[in-house]
């Protein structure tokens, strides 16, 4: 069966329909307490590449379940008025995830442009302490 909508097309659509934030702005907003960073990468990526101190890890496969207050898997961190800034390695998965959470009714969602890779490129702080 041929693919009629590629992943690149899905990501481009999601990016058009979501709010984005630069890594520097995400860092500043996290430091000021105005935003919570949500790392949706796989646990192996965190162990291999490091993580952003203070970011909450919500694996992509559980995100909707953890975000939904009616789910038995709900995590209270999602029941906030604070801005939630999602990121993955390069901002593809997080763009799709941000779109999904918006579709669920969240209005406080942003996607971090370029993801963890852009964060590292901007020389923003990371930790490799393996506390994942």
Image (spheres, rainbow, N blue to C red):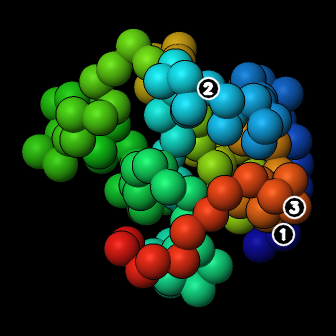
Above or below for 79 versus 115:
above
Q: Position of residue 20 (x, y in %)?
A: 77, 29
Q: Where is mark 1, residue-wise? A: 2
Classify residue 78 as left or right of residue 124: left
Task: Place residue 30 in its image quadrant.
Answer: top right
Q: Residue at x 63, y 50 (%)?
A: 87
Classify residue 14 as left or right of residue 35: right
Q: For the N terminus, give its image quadrant.
A: bottom right
Above or below for 82 versus 72:
above
CA–CA distance in space, label 3 to label 1: 37 Å
Classify residue 6 as left or right of residue 68: right
Q: Residue at x 37, y 72 (%)?
A: 132
Of the two numbered discs 2 and 1 on the same chain, state the one appearing first in sequence. 1
Which marked residue is nearer to the observer: mark 3 or mark 1? Answer: 3
Q: Secondary structure at mark 2?
A: helix
Q: Secondary structure at mark 1?
A: loop
Q: Where is mark 2, residue-wise? A: 29
């Amino acid at each position: 069966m041929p693919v009629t909508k590629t992943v690149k097309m899905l990501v481009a659509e999601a990016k058009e329909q979501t709010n984005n934030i630069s890594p520097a702005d995400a860092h500043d907003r996290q430091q000021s307490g105005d935003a919570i960073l949500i790392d949706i990468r796989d646990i192996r990526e965190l162990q291999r590449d490091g993580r952003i101190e203070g970011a909450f890890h919500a694996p992509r496969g559980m995100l909707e379940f953890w975000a939904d207050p009616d789910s038995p898997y709900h995590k209270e961190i999602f029941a906030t008025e604070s801005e939630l800034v999602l990121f993955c390695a390069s901002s593809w998965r997080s763009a799709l995830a941000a779109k999904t959470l918006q579709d669920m009714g969240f209005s406080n969602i942003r996607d971090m442009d370029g993801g963890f890779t852009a964060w590292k490129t901007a020389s923003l702080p990371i930790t490799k302490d393996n506390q994942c």
